[in-house]
Image (cartoon, helix red, strand yellow):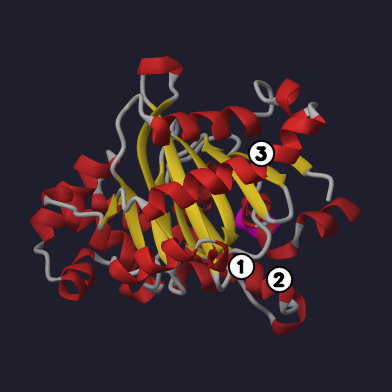
Amino acid sequence: MTPIYRHTICQAIEELECGMPGWEQRYHPVAPGGSLGEISRLDFGTLSLYREEMQRLTLNSFLMPEGHLAVYFLLGGAEGGGSSVLEAGFAMTPRWLTMLQRPGVRCVSVELAADLLPAAMEAGADVACSGVFDHAPRGAIAQTGQWIDFLVSPTNGAYSRSNASLLAIAPGLITDRLTLWFEERVWARKRRQGTARAFAATLDWLAAAEAVDMSVTQLSAATGFDSRTLRRASMAEAGLGLDRLLTMQRLNLARRALIIAREAGAREKGAKVSDIALDHGFPHWGRFAGQYRAMFGERPTDTLRGRLALAEE
């Protein structure tokens, strides 16, 4: 098939959540601002390349397509013009995972069917379905991540993507690299220490927690970490106070409830923004509306009624 390229600058959460076909995704911004970010996709049929860059601090919970493998590279940093590979790893798991995506750090990934890489399936079984690659800053793994980042870039990669011969050989070259890394076993379980371990537990908990559970007390009981450790970990790893992080997550869950009410026919069922705000722990209507508009760029009533309905009035 002819490779298909698409680049989207995302103003709405829904645009991000539709950016990776076959994936179930939930993007929850935890900092206010303008556009959320951008996502690029280069689809070869046998494998797909993705490049995500957030403009705001964002929680991303995702469920991969069954039977698929994702190899990822996190790129950023001052050295190399922001193209240093900070981490490289892989995942092939049927459960929800959550990561914190930071402004200035790009997530570049390769998605393909896991059975195309038998050695990867063996690796996944050994490290509970996800792990990291042991890579040198200027080594082959880092260089591959940088090349994929360049190829999928909406600006830098345009010339390369115009070369039909390169596009024809690229999937084979990428698959060869991945096969080599798994066969040579240059991977290990991702080990977290100190605050990173506590914050990882926080992210795992956030992926499934409901608004009624969204408190530091509940988080501490569920993870086994004391509240001081959890708060210190959130500030150290995310640069954001834990209490504010949980408030922002409740705000995101309130938005999802508004969308569900809209799709269910809010006007007929009598759903009210004030009730949904209360359900998610926001007793002060004015403060809720102000925080909501700063985060999502629209009023809660706009979300409930739908922008299309408002435009028709």
Query: Could you tell me how far apart the alpha carbons at marks 1 and 2 are, in whole angstroms?
Result: 6 Å
Q: Which residue is mark 3?
A: 170
Q: Position of residue 247 (x, y in %)?
A: 36, 56
Asked whether disc 1 touches disc 2, contact meaning CB atoms under 8 Å apart, the reply is: yes
Where residue 258 is drawn, which disc sits there?
1
Q: Quadrant of residue 21?
A: bottom right
Question: Badge 1 local density, few (<14 within 10 Å), some, or many (20+)?
Answer: many
Whole-angstrom CA distance, mark 3 to mark 2, is 44 Å
- Closer to us: 75 or 160: 160
Report the predominant secondary structure element of the magenta stretch.
helix
Q: Amino acid at mark 2?
A: Arg
Give the residue displayed 15% in from the left and 49% down from the top. Answer: 195
Q: Local crowd at mark 3 within 10 Å, few (<14), some, or many (≥20)?
A: some
Q: In the visual, does 286 lie left or right of 23?
A: left
Compared to residue 95, the image places residue 41 above or below, namely above
Residue 9 visible to an observer of this rendering: no
Q: Which residue has dot 2 on it?
A: 262
Q: Is residue 74 magenta-colored?
A: no
Can I make out residue 216 in this image?
A: yes
Q: Is 212 displayed left or right of 252 in the figure?
A: left
302 or 90: nearer the eye? 90
- Which element is circle 3 on? helix
Q: Position of residue 260 (x, y in %)?
A: 64, 73
261 left or right of 2 in image: left
Nearer mark to the viewer, of 3 and 2? 3
Q: Magenta segment range?
A: 298-302
Q: Position of residue 17 (x, y in %)?
A: 62, 56
Q: Which is more toward the observer, 258 or 62? A: 62
Q: Is residue 79 above or below residue 209?
A: above
Cα gap from disc 1 to disc 3, whole angstroms: 43 Å
